[in-house]
Image (cartoon, rainbow, N blue to C red):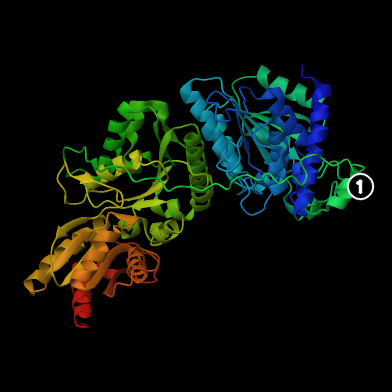
Amino acid sequence: MADLEYLESFASEARKNCLFCIANLGVGHVGGSLSIIEILTYLLNGEMRNLYPDDPGCEDRDMLVVSKGHSGPALYSILAKKGYFPMSWLNTLNQGGTRLPSHCDRNQTPGIDMSTGSLGQGISAACGIAYAAKLKKTDQRTYCIIGDGETEEGQNWEAAMFAKAKCLDNLIVITDYNKLQLDGPVAQVLSLNDLETKWRAFGWEVIRCNGHDLKDLDRAFSQCHERNGQPKMVICDTVKAKGFPRLENKPESHNANISLDEVKELYNNDVPSWLGEKDRPEPLKFKKASLPKPASSCIEDTSVEMRQAYCQTLMDIAEKDPRLVILEADLMKSSGTVPFMNRFGVRAIDCGIAEANMVGIASGLSVQGYIPFAATFACFAGRRTFDQFFISSNYARLNVKLVGTDPGVAAVYNGGTHMPFEDIGLMRMIPDLVIAEPSDAASVSGLVRAMYDYQGCCYLRLQRKDSPAIYAKDEKFELGRSKVLAEGKDVTLIGLGAVMMQQVLKAASMLEKDGIHATVIDALTVKPLDSGLILAKAKETGAIVTCENHQVDGGLGMAVTKLLADENVPCRMGYIGIQGRFGQVGNLDYLIHEYNLSAEDICAKAKAILERK
């Protein structure tokens, strides 16, 4: 039985500190912070095990994901009181250089296990954390707090199905059921109907309690630990902005203006001692991860399909490193990873047709120290998982490798809906993300190994089918380094990916017959570019044609152009790529010619820019 008298006193002080923290700034997420004070108080005072303020990263600790990340002020007030950081930090909420941002950030604030803010993503990360605990065969529990309005996000239900299917009985999700969201009552905006019955229908154990009654919370969580075999849902009936009369139980409390004067009046001028203290945290400065040493291909037969090289390389790594796991979204057969599943079992995670959830799970696995490679068609990797990959993986500065297969016209018979011409453009906007596209089986193997060695997020653009070998089986590959396949003095052809490198090599041969000597570069990595090589060749030849199976806008061509402009290197540019069009169905040869990606098109473009000399 918990010490209820102590917990009630703790919660009362935490609510007071939370209010003064927000009032000191003058505006903040009052409603959803005050509604979970008692819940957090209970969790962080004995319910969660192995929590040590002087060792917040203790590997054996139970973990907490506050998916409704805007409730950060509530969590900060409790973490500060527990000693994770000085109470004076509460003066800095949302101010420049703070370590206490409006939404929870695992890299900024000691005691935060997962960065959150984009609603609906936290439960997927929690599933990944819980799954990792199962892989490690520990008794570690994972807790996740979600909002009732947040429950309208479909990703929650993808995660709910996954948790039941994988028997994650070490996962406890808590719904802050205050029945209000920003635009009004949840029942009016988008009714959840019978929430208990809904979660039970997804196969969860459901317990309901008063989220402000610490004795009832104790009962609910005690019941959780008595029942195994199913994930647990604790529905906590709460009041939005509990304890602040002017905003209590009102939708406008979500993000509201409150003044120090009214909070002082509420507490009869009993001001916390930390208020106004000058001690401020040092702002964090993140260093870019260093690129790893060159990695060798491990493919004996360089004529195999590129997806086969992908799977074989992962299997070779996984034999030596138990941290490597793969995730698929009902595409193991398409991605060629069935052999991995047959060999490594539970380290191959099929998430079903739920790409957003897959990336969230991958992020949770990374929190636990695993190295996840998550694959799906490139059209889904870019369009469907972008928010999850941006926030849960990259913003959280985790170590997730996302693989997009069948890029551009390589989607062939899947047609226009499945033909991503925009994925590189999207991914280039993510800070520090490494983006690579191999051109044959050997480069697949080398780049996969290099990404495995790299501590940070990566995006691999992967053609699934076979492509003629360009490199020897023992070739070494390095992120951020391109390969020169031919030297010429007249023009530089920079290609990217299997589809285009075959056309570039053919074009170089055709130009040679016409007396035009071309330098041929296989870019391999779009971000970071091999800047030194490209600048050197721009100066040597004075003419570059970029060749990509992607929209020219946002892709390789624009990346090279920006590099030249930034370095003030004059160079005539030509662009081969998709020019503002959607995809369509057809065989590869038809599509290459339809979108002017052929060797003949490359030759014509090279000659045209040379005429501008």
Position in image of residue 407 (x %, y %): 34, 55
Position in image of residue 89 (x %, y %): 68, 43
Position in image of residue 568 (x %, y %): 33, 72
Query: Do we see residue 588 in this rendering?
Result: no
Q: Nearer the viewer, residue 55 or 344?
A: 55
Asked which quadrant contains residue 584, the reply is bottom left
Q: Nearer the viewer, residue 291 or 127?
A: 291
Q: In this rendering, would 521 be left or right of 189?
A: left
Q: Quadrant location of the C terminus?
A: bottom left
Query: Do we see residue 435 in this rendering?
Result: yes
Position in image of residue 560 (x %, y %): 32, 66
Relative to residue 219, is residue 606 depicted above or below?
A: below
Q: Nearer the viewer, residue 443 or 206?
A: 443
Q: In this rendering, would 424 be left or right of 101?
A: left
Which amino acid type corresponds to the residue marked 1 in the rendered image? Answer: Glu
**Which residue lies under the disc numbered 1?**
265
Relative to residue 208, is residue 501 depicted above or below?
A: below
Residue at the image point whose x is 74% and y is 48% from the top: 191
Residue at the image point whose x is 46% and y is 32% from the top: 369
Q: In this rendering, would 365 be left or right of 93?
A: left
Secondary element type, mark 1? helix
Residue at the image point whose x is 76% and y is 56% from the top: 183
Q: Quadrant location of the N terminus?
A: top right
Residue at the image point whose x is 35% and y is 55% from the top: 528
Mark 1, Cα crowd under 10 Å, few <14 / some 14-19 / many 20+, is few
Q: In this rendering, would 471 be left or right of 31?
A: left
